[in-house]
Structure formats: C-alpha cells, structure tokens
Amino acid sequence: GQGIIQDILLQVNIGKEESKGGFLKEEVPKALELASGLKGIYVRGIMAIPPPLEENAGKSPFFEEMYELFVDSSQKRYNNVSMDFLSMGMSQDFELAIRNGANIVRVGSAIFGERKY
C-alpha cells in the first residue's frame, strides 16, 4: 500500500560464505547510499550470522568486524537510515555477540528447543 514504510535490517555476509546471502562488508556503504534513495523502506541497522564454528570464541573476530561496521555506518548520514540495531548472535553464541555490541539476538532454540526438520 501507499504510504507504508517498512523498517529493515541489511544482511551482511560477514564470513563471505557462498551458502549465505547478504552484502559483503565492503558493499555496505554503497548499499546504504542506494537505500537512502528508496521510498518505502527505512534501514534501521545491520544483521549477520557468522560462519558455524565448533568453538564460539572463533566467532569473536566476525562479531568485532560487524560492530566496527555498525559504528562506522552510524557515523555517516543517509536519508532513510538510522543505525539503531546490530543483530547478531543466536542461542549458542548470544552472550559473545552481546559482549561485542549486539543489541538484538535470536534465541529461538534456547526458548522453544531445537528445530525438528
């Protein structure tokens, strides 16, 4: 419908994984610039899921990179963009993500149990 503005988060493929979508870290500034000219969306932040690793500590560099990107992007001014949210971390690594600046985490399996496929 007309006049509706959808809040969105840009997905960042922080691990450069072929199996995942999203913008590469270096593409985010251009994506924000392009998004600033679009009607109907409002970018509220960025989100990422790091590569699956056996040890959660190995995810720290990815979370740190995302936080750096979040801060850098927050310092720039775009129309239709406010860097309010950094979404990263899930049930198995949310504490590490929070320590690295996440303010949205996804903890579905911690609440509802593992998915049954």
Image (tube, rainbow, N blue to C red):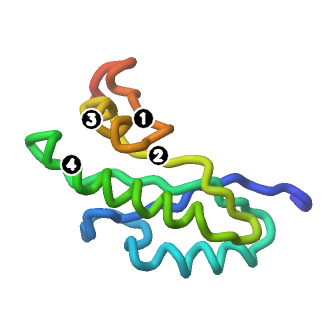
Which secondary structure lies at badge 1? strand
- The one nearer the camera, 111 or 89, is 89
- Check if mark 1's residue and mark 2's residue have beta carbons within 8 Å: yes
- Residue 59's tag is 4
* Pointer 4 local density, CA inside 10 Å: few below 14, some 14–19, many at least 20: many
Q: Earlier in the sequence, mark 4 or mark 3?
A: 4
- The CA distance from mark 4 to mark 3 is 8 Å
Residue drawn at the location 23% of the way across and 48% of the way down = 60
- The CA distance from mark 1 to mark 4 is 16 Å
Q: Where the N terminus falls, by quadrant?
A: bottom right
- The one nearer the camera, 32 or 116, is 32
Please tell me whether mark 3 or mark 1 is closer to you in this view. Answer: 3
- Residue 93's tag is 3
**Which residue is the site of mark 2?**
87
Q: Earlier in the sequence, mark 4 or mark 2?
A: 4
- Looking at the picture, which amino acid does disc 1 mark? Arg
Q: Which of marks 1 and 4 is nearer the N terminus?
A: 4
Residue drawn at the location 40% of the way across and 78% of the way down = 26
- Check if mark 4's residue and mark 2's residue have beta carbons within 8 Å: no
- Looking at the picture, which amino acid does disc 4 mark? Lys
- The CA distance from mark 1 to mark 2 is 8 Å
- The one nearer the camera, 85 or 12, is 85
Question: Is residue 1 shown above or below 31?
Answer: above
- Residue 106's tag is 1
Q: Which of marks 3 and 1 is nearer the N terminus?
A: 3
- Looking at the picture, which amino acid does disc 2 mark? Ser
Q: Position of residue 80 (x, y in %)?
A: 75, 65
Relative horizontal placement of residue 50, taking residue 10 as reference (left or right):
left
- The one nearer the camera, 82 or 68, is 68
Q: Which residue lies furthest to the right in this view?
A: 3
Which secondary structure lies at badge 2? strand
